[in-house]
Image: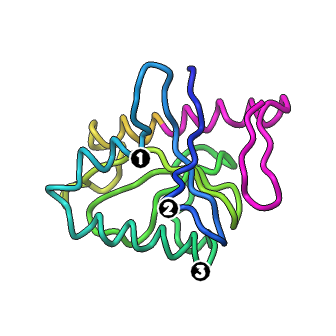
Amino acid sequence: MEFDLKEIEELSGAKAHVYSVVFESEEDSLLEQFVKENAQQYSKEMKKIFAKIKKMADITGCRKNFFKEGEGVWADGVVALNHTGRLRLYGIYFNDTVILFGSGGYKPPHVKSYQEYPPLNTKAQQIKDIAQEIMKLIKSGELRIEEDGTLIKI
C-alpha cells in the first residue's frame, strides 16, 4: 500500500494539523474524495463536519470527545467524527495536535453499524488498513509526529 500524507493546509490551524492520505495512483486525497462524493447531496452535514474540523484546528485542538473511538482494532487510533448526522467521516487520531482523515459516507437509518453496510464498511476498512501501515512506519522510524502535530514521513 503506497501512499503519501498530505497536510490539508486550509483546514489546519494554530491548535491542530489536519492531514489526509493520497494513494500513489490518485490525485485527490481521501478527504477530497469524501467531499466530492458527498458535498452536493449532504451539504448540511458537510458544513457541520468542516465547521467542527476548523474549530479543532483553530481553537480547541483535537479533543478525544470529538470522536467516536473503537472503529478499528484496539489502539490503532481509528475514529469517526462525532455528531455529524448520518454522514460518517473516518480518520486516525494521534493526539490533540494532529488528526488524519480518510473517507466515509452516508449511514442509512436502518443500519446499526458500518459493518452491516458494504459501502461504509469499505471506507472504514480502508482507514483501518492505513492505520496498520502508519503504525508500521512509526515503529520503524519512517514517520515521526512532532510536538506541534507536524507529521514527517522519512
Q: Which mark is residue 8?
A: none
Q: Secondary structure at mark 1?
A: helix
Quadrant assignment, res 85: bottom left
| Residues tagged 2 and 1 counted as in contact (Cβ below 8 A) | no
* Number of numbered discs visible in the structure rendering: 3
Query: How many angstroms separate mark 3 from mark 1 (CA)?
Result: 21 Å
- Tag 1 residue: 31
Q: Secondary structure at mark 2?
A: loop
Amino acid tagged 1: Leu
- Tag 2 residue: 11
Quadrant assignment, res 5: top right
Please name whichever residue, 80 or 3, is drawn nearer the observer in this view of the structure: 3
**Residue numbers of the magenta segment:** 127-154
Q: Position of residue 122 (x, y in %)?
A: 36, 34
Disc 2 crowd rating (10 Å Cα; few below 14, some 14-19, many 20+) is some
Sequence order check, earlier mark of 3 and 1: 1
Q: Position of residue 111 (x, y in %)?
A: 24, 54
Q: Is residue 149 left or right of residue 83?
A: right
- Tag 3 residue: 59
Q: Residue furthest bottom?
A: 59
Query: How many angstroms separate mark 3 from mark 2 (CA)?
Result: 12 Å
Amino acid tagged 3: Ile
Q: Is residue 43 left or right of residue 24?
A: left
- Dividing the image into 4 quarters, which one contains the C terminus? top right
Residue 81 drawn in magenta: no
Sequence order check, earlier mark of 3 and 2: 2
Amino acid tagged 2: Leu
Q: Secondary structure at mark 3?
A: helix
Quadrant assignment, res 17: bottom right
